[in-house]
Amino acid sequence: MGRIIYSVASSLDGFNTDGDGGFAWAMPDEEVIAALTADAASVSTYLYGRRMYETMAGWETDPSWAEGSPESARFAQVWTRAEKVVFSTTLESVTTSRTRIERALTVEAVERAKAEAPGDLTVEGPTLAANALRLGVVDVVELLICPAVVGGGTPVFPPGVRLDLRLARERRFPNGMVQVTYERAA
């Protein structure tokens, strides 16, 4: 069974979005996209909340995203072939293939997704991840730390959650981004 990986872009001050809900400061360059695409090759299933799913769906529904660069085209291929599970009480239908809706993030729903997945699963977006962290189902935390201080917004980690982690990998990129991967300590 695969691991549950919380994968998220973070400002230096610990936010995924700024106070206006924007994340333009977190846009990766070609080298970072290539590294993220290589990581995504082991991911067979993405776990999303509604907002993150609607943001990411463009990789399949808007051809101009893939046309942006060769690395974007490769990421779109990797993303499109993976399964997607959207946890939402309000979403009535999906716009991408290989996608299903679950009404609630529960330990049972995560275990069901893990049992069906031949590889790793990512939980993306801090709102859904907050619930996954509280449920104790996250095995790996992977932060793409961006060289920006945004002063507020959506926090990467929810208050009150404690995790004991060990550093498994660190990658630095010329654009100032740093990717750190932590595994849960035994």
Image (cartoon, rainbow, N blue to C red):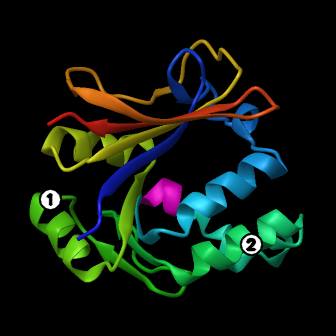
The circle drawn on residue 57 is none
The tag earlier along the polypeptide, 1 or 2, is 2
Q: Which residue is mark 1?
A: 106
Which of these two is toward me, 177 or 136? 177
Question: x, y (%) of residue 37?
Answer: 65, 62
Q: Secondary structure at mark 1?
A: loop
Q: Tell me the residue at 40%/58% (across/down).
A: 122
Based on the displayed image, in which of its 4 quarters is residue 175 positioned? top right
Which of these two is toward me, 183 or 134? 183
> Residue 28, relative to residue 156: is it above or below?
below
Which of these two is toward me, 179 or 55? 179
> Residue 176, relative to residue 76: is it above or below?
above
Label 1: few (<14), some or many (≥20) within 10 Å? some
What predominant SS class does the magenta segment belong to?
helix
Which numbered disc, 1 or 2, marks the residue closer to the eye?
A: 2
Q: Is residue 18 left or right of residue 101?
A: right
Task: Give the magenta range.
Answer: 49-53
Disc 2 marks a residue whose amino acid type is: Arg
Q: What quarter of the picture does the N terminus occupy?
A: bottom left
Label 2: few (<14), some or many (≥20) within 10 Å? some
Based on the displayed image, in which of its 4 quarters is residue 115 positioned? bottom left
Question: x, y (%) of residue 67?
Answer: 88, 72
The circle drawn on residue 74 is 2
Check if residue 84 falls in the magenta segment: no
> Residue 79, relative to residue 147: is it above or below?
below
